[in-house]
Structures are given as structure tokens and as C-alpha cells.
Amino acid sequence: MWGIFPSSTSSGYSANIGGEIYNLVVYPLRVLFFQGPKLWGFGFGGSSGAESMCQSFTDVRSEFWSVSEETRRECFEILEKKFRGFVIGTVAVFTIAFCFQFMYLSINRYFLLKPLNEVNKNLERVISALNGCLLSPVVELEVDEVDEINKNKKLN
């Protein structure tokens, strides 16, 4: 039997893209796809073996997939196609999530934070002007000086 990781040395992802990308992205997805949990008949391979995975994908009994080397190869091709679809779907979901996050942060920065910074600058100017008025020294006038100012106002 050829094991749970059918294309570790075949012409799969490891031969088509760089080893670093394979090790960081594709290999963990391969482990998840072939050995991930299977709950109530849904999910990943659940370490159930290649024949039972092919049975779940094709509705052909698992005994058929272990009859000959040709059927095993067909099962391998089915699993590899399903895995590639899983990788493409996963990458698409993360790409869309990244784009939405980038749009959210861009909109937040340019349409919310930038105007709020302008409002904040204007408020700081107003507050500093008010502080300047409130903190200026108060001139205390004596009663005689106030009377003199009032008399001048009446004359004018």
C-alpha cells in the first residue's frame, strides 16, 4: 500500500512549487486533508485510509480500490484532485479575507481616522485659544478707576 500521503514524491505540489512554500503552506494542508478530523461523516480523511476516502468521494466500495495497482492509482488521482481543490479553495478564502481586511483598514484610515485627526487638531486649537483667554492675567481695577471709566462712557 502507498500510504496516506500519495504525492509526497510524485508530480504534485512538491515538484511544481518551491520547497519552502510547500513546507509552509501545502504540507500542513495535506496533513489536515488526509488526517484531519471526520465528524458525523463530514470533514477530512480522519486517518481512515485512502480506499475509504475514495469510497466517500465516489460511492464505490472500498474493496474495489484495493483490487489492483490500477485502481489504487485511480484512487490516488481522485484524492490528489480533491486535495488540489481543497488547496485552491483554502487559498481563495484566505485571499478574499485578506482583501476585505485590507479594504476595511484602508476605509477606516482614510475615511474615519483622517477626518477625526482634523477634528482633533481643530479642537486642540480651540482649546489652546480658550486656555490663552482664561489664563491671561486679570487686571484688577480700583473703584475710583471704574468710576472714571463709567464717567467717560457717559460723556461720549
Image (spheres, rainbow, N blue to C red):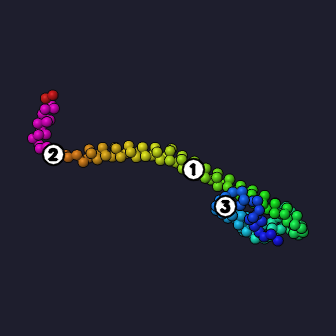
Q: Nearer the viewer, mark 2 or mark 3?
A: 3
Q: Position of residue 35 (x, y in %)?
A: 73, 68
Q: Amino acid at mark 1?
A: Phe
Q: Quadrant of residue 70?
A: bottom right
Q: Is residue 64 above or below residue 115?
A: below
- Residue, far top: 156
The reply to whether the magenta stretch includes residue 144 is yes
Residue type for callout 3: Gly
Disc 2 versus disc 3: distance between alpha carbons?
83 Å
User: In the image, is 49 to the left or to the right of 61?
Assistant: left
Query: Can residue 124 be seen?
Result: yes
Choose the circle earlier in sequence order: 1 or 2.
Answer: 1
Marks 2 & 3, CB-CB < 8 Å contact: no
Considering every residue shown, the one lying at the far left of the view is 144
Circle nearer the N terminus (1, 3): 3
Disc nearest the viewer among 1 and 2 = 1
Which residue is at a point 66% across and 63% down the rendered structure image?
23
Q: Position of residue 151 (x, y in %)?
A: 12, 33
Q: Which residue is mark 1?
A: 102
- Circle 3 is placed at which residue position? 19
The residue singled out by tag 2 in the image is: 140
N-term-proximal mark, 2 vs 3: 3
Provide the secondary structure element on which disc 1 rests: helix
Q: Quadrant of the C terminus?
A: top left
Q: Between 139 and 51, which is closer to the camera in this rendering?
A: 51
Quadrant of the image containing the N terminus:
bottom right
- Element type where label 2 sits in the image: loop
Dot 3 alpha-carbon crowd within 10 angstroms: few under 14, some 14 to 19, many 20 or more = some
Q: CA distance from mark 1 to mark 2?
A: 60 Å
Looking at the rendering, the stretch of residues picked out in magenta corresponds to: 141-154
Between 19 and 87, the one nearer to me in the picture: 19
